[in-house]
Image (cartoon, rainbow, N blue to C red):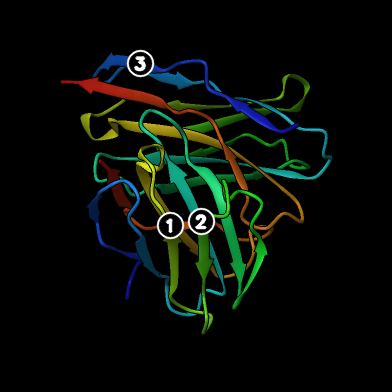
Amino acid sequence: GAGVSQTPSNKVTEKGKYVELRCDPISGHTALYWYRQSLGQGPEFLIYFQGTGAADDSGLPNDRFFAVRPEGSVSTLKIQRTERGDSAVYLCASSATPLDTGELFFGEGSRLTVL
Amino acid sequence: AQKVTQAQTEISVVEKEDVTLDCVYETRDTTYYLFWYKQPPSGELVFLIRRNSFDEQNEISGRYSWNFQKSTSSFNFTITASQVVDSAVYFCALGVYNQGGKLIFGQGTELSVKP
């Protein structure tokens, strides 16, 4: 597609449930990033993929969070045993090359609400 | 540690006024990048500018201008003759060389331009 696409745009779930959020980056972009944005805050880095592998997952808050990118294109962020504190907008971004030379193109985000 | 501070949480101006958004950063790295992003109500972060740490030249793009001063670790953003369409949340961000897409964002400044 023309831009970064994220689905679902909104997700409401109950505490303890499992959630998957999907990101389809701009075609040809090798680098993919997940960020989390809480209300009134700036985005916080979660994980960065270069191709199929996670180059930096230092921002994942705990082992309930996991992300994959099996074919080097679409990525899925997976959250197990959701907690109310996981409520936030999850942003995906892609770039043609790693940040050192490029700019990030962000999607509109997936708003997760955990009741 | 790396940090970005945007001390102005909210700014309100009347159309055609000039407005400056402040950004102060902290890093011990000698090679880094600074960014400004715009986040309209739709939620999608839009890239505005990237500056390299070794390039202190100020930049002007239409009604937008940026003032980068390493001596004060600041990267301020000025909108000249503001318009209602400039209303958005603006984020300053810091990226470090060799850390891929791991941007450190400030908490954002919400700009409201009234007609």
Distance from label 1 to label 2 (Cα)?
5 Å
* Residues under numbered marks 1 and 2 in contact, where contact means CB atoms less than 8 Å apart: yes
Tag 3 residue: B11
Q: How many marks?
A: 3
Q: Residue furthest left?
A: B115
Whether residues under marks 3 and 2 lie with C-beta atoms below 8 angstroms apart, the answer is no
Could you say where residue B38 lies in the image, as x and y percent from the top left?
39, 40
Three-letter code for the amino acid on which mark 3 is drawn: Ile
Question: In the drawing, what numbered circle is on residue A22?
Answer: none
Residue B17 appears left or right of A38: left
> In which image quadrant can residue A99 be found?
bottom right
Give how far apart the Cα atoms at labels 3 and 1 are.
Answer: 36 Å
Q: Which residue is mark 1?
A: A79
Classify mark 1: residues with Cα within 10 Å, few (<14), some (14-19) or many (20+): many
Instruction: Mark 3 vs mark 1: give the one in front.
Output: 1
Pointer 3 and pointer 2 on the same chain: no
Q: Amino acid at mark 2?
A: Phe
Task: Please name the residue that numbered disc 2 is placed on.
Answer: A65
| SS of the residue under disc 3 | strand
Task: State which tag comes first along the sequence, 1 or 2.
Answer: 2
User: Where A94 falls versus A106 (above or below)?
Assistant: below
Q: Position of residue A35 (x, y in %)?
A: 49, 50
Front-most of residues B5 and B16: B5
Residue B94 located left or right of residue B54: left
